[in-house]
Amino acid sequence: ASEAVGQWVLMSTGRSPTNIAVIKYWGKRDEALILPVNDSISVTLDPDHLSATTTVAVSPAFSSDRMWLNGKEISLSGGRFQSCLREIRKRACDFEDEKKGIKIKKEDWEKLHVHIASYNNFPTAAGLASSAAGFACLVFTLGKLMNVKEDYGELSSIARQGSGSACRSIYGGFVKWCMGKKDDGSDSIAVQLADEAHWKDLVIIIAVVSSKQKETSSTTGMRDSVETSPLLQYRAQTVVPSRVLKMEEAIKHHDFESFAKLTCADSNQFHAVCLDTSPPIFYMNDTSHRIISLVEKWNQSEGSPQVAYTFDAGPNAVLIARNRKTAALLLQKLLYYFPPQDKDLSSYLVGDKSILSD
Ligand code: PMV
């Protein structure tokens, strides 16, 4: 809490990483509440590299809710922002800071306006600007500021209303978003399957294939797939339920072979659904396909998977290596087959650059 002239400002700051789905969420059964047609599983990335940092402030001096993203003011009028703000305000509790003489009653939070400033620590234009980190961070930080007592499961169901995949970024490690059965969405929450320390060997490398903004947003893409793709129904009802169980087992037992096979198969099926949509959606490009071939050939020649690949609603490859040694080899292969124009590798690598000397 800091005091302005005759006024006060109460602030809170938080940081949330983005997450990468290894069993994909694609398709909503309720668009307003953001309820999915299937469960999904993801791994939350290291907050040092791909995360959102958000500061939220309230003050009687603020006359409206406002938000800045990477220093630029953006509109808060969208339904998704409004849902998150409303749901957090509803759960706000009494707050008191005796030293500063600040006392906020539960019902007063409704009248106080918020200012929100959020930054991504990764290039926003790199096609990785997932809303997952942003909404998870907004909900978490706002909850902290407004003294919300709800558990992480409840917070995840609020973040879900900002962006579906955001519910999984409330936790670190491996996370499952349970689709839930209820119409009000109260059981559509994320749960942690294993924490950050569970599978330390894995190394995730993100190969930025294109920094262009995707042509079809996930919202539009999902809507079109739900309406037109027969494969989506089959996937959601028949394939994903058993795949989720197998993936949970693979994670529990550090079974990389099963983990990699399931991850690649699920990414490929998600993109097959996109192709099965009318009009078809092409998120991957030739470079993405060449990366898949490289990994598939390598895995085949080794006799067991060394690397898993997965692609979201864009051409960038997320590659998961079984250990650091494999990750170093993978990096060498990527740099050999896709030589960067600029030889200064440090400008390409975000994160732990020491892997280059392994
Ligand atoms: O939460 P959204 O609307 O950004 O959708 C995310 C969809 C995928 O990234 C393709 C898959 C997933 O489960 O994260």
Image (cartoon, rainbow, N blue to C red):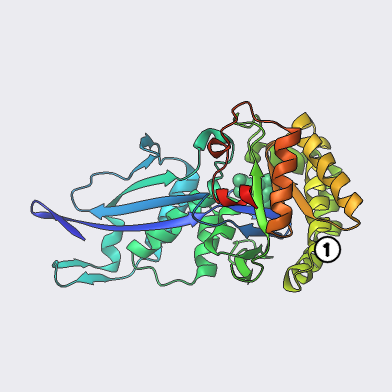
Asked if residue 98 lies left or right of residue 126, the reply is left
Q: In the image, residue 36 lies at what x, y percent?
A: 68, 54
Please tell me how crowded label 1 is: few (under 14), some (14-19), or many (20+) other residues with Cα within 10 Å: some
Q: Can the viewer see residue 312 in this picture?
A: no
Q: Secondary structure at mark 1?
A: helix
Observer able to see residue 250? yes
Quadrant of the rendered image containing residue 209? top right
Residue that appears at 87% across and 58% down: 304
Q: Quadrant of residue 231?
A: top right
On screen, 104 above or below 15? below
Would you say the beta carbon of the disc 1 residue lies within 8 angstroms of ligand 1? no
Q: How many marks?
A: 1
Nearest the viewer among 53 and 306 is 306
Q: Is residue 212 above or below residue 90?
A: above
Residue displayed at 25% across by 68% down: 105
Going by the image, does 286 lie left or right of 195? right
Q: Quadrant of the N terminus?
A: bottom left
| Location of residue 223 by image quarter | top right
Tell whether 339 sits left or right of 32. Answer: right
Q: Amino acid at mark 1?
A: Ser
Farthest left residue in view: 6
Across and down, in percent, residue 77 comes to 42, 40
Q: Residue at x 78, y 29 (%)?
A: 286
Residue 115 in the image: state x and y as whole percent: 31, 47
* Residue at the top extreme, as displayed: 341
At x 44% / y 60%, what residue is drawn?
140
Please state the horizontal and vertical placement of residue 269, each as a whole percent of the image: 82, 47
The residue that label 1 is drawn on is 258
Tell whether 209 sits left or right of 115.
Answer: right
